Image (cartoon, grey):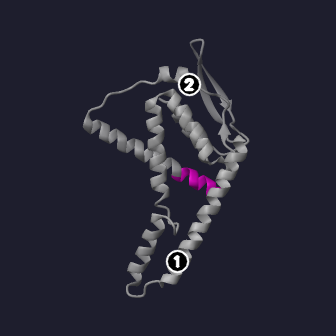
Amino acid sequence: MDEWRDLLKVVSSLKVGEAINVEVLRNHQVQTFSMTPLTDESGQLKLGIAVNSEIYKNLVTKERLGPIDAFGAAITKTVDDGAMIFKFIGRMIKGDFHINTMAGPVSIANIAGQALASGLVFFVQLAALFSINIGLLNLLPIPVLDGGRLVGFGIEKIMGKHQFPDSIKIKVLQIGAAMMFIFMAIVIGYDVVRWF
């Protein structure tokens, strides 16, 4: 693993009760430990290790890339970050994660503050991650989102002249909006309870 986030990806991909072998460099010797992540109060898997933000800043190296290489690296980074949201949604559907593990506005503000305290680069990376996730979530086939509208347009295109009546379109949008509002209210509710 080259970065701290690589370990986070591995831990987040584990199932509850699944062990992982961790190699640690201690006193110039590599030691291997079998560790089983535990779930915290929010349902997230944790190994129980952390990196001090000041130390982490000193561990980070910056690599300067030319325009072409930088564009390729940005595409790769975007694809990797985008894949994480779909993996998370898939695990939520399977029941590996509870909805209370999602970050609401309070948690997002706290995470953003920590990122900004660590440096502008970290804050910009976090902002980019949020932008990617929001863009991809907007493409989900939920009626009130753009993805739902695209699905609707596709169905109407297949149907040809036999399009949905406006009353049905409005009803579907209302149901989609209600589902989104309920979902957001639950996430925000858990978020507020967690912090207050």
Residue at image coords 48%, 59%: 138
Magenta segment, principal secondary structure?
helix
The residue segment tinted magenta is 86-95
Ranked by sequence position, the earlier of labels 1 and 2 is 2
Is residue 88 part of the magenta span, yes or no? yes
Disc 1 marks which residue?
Answer: 170
Q: Position of residue 71 (x, y in %)?
A: 30, 41
**Left or right position of 102 against 163:** right
Give neighbour class at mark 2: few <14, some 14-19, many 20+ (Cα, 10 Å). some
Q: Position of residue 188 (x, y in %)?
A: 65, 51
Indicate the secondary structure of the residue bearing disc 2.
Answer: helix
Q: Are marks 1 and 2 in contact (CB under 8 Å)?
A: no
* Residue type, numbered disc 2: Ser
* Residue type, numbered disc 1: Ile
Disc 2 marks which residue?
Answer: 53
In the image shown, does 58 or 3 lie closer to the viewer? 58
Quadrant (top left/top right/bottom left/bottom right) for the C terminus: top right
> What is the CA distance from the residue labelled 1 to the residue labelled 2?
49 Å
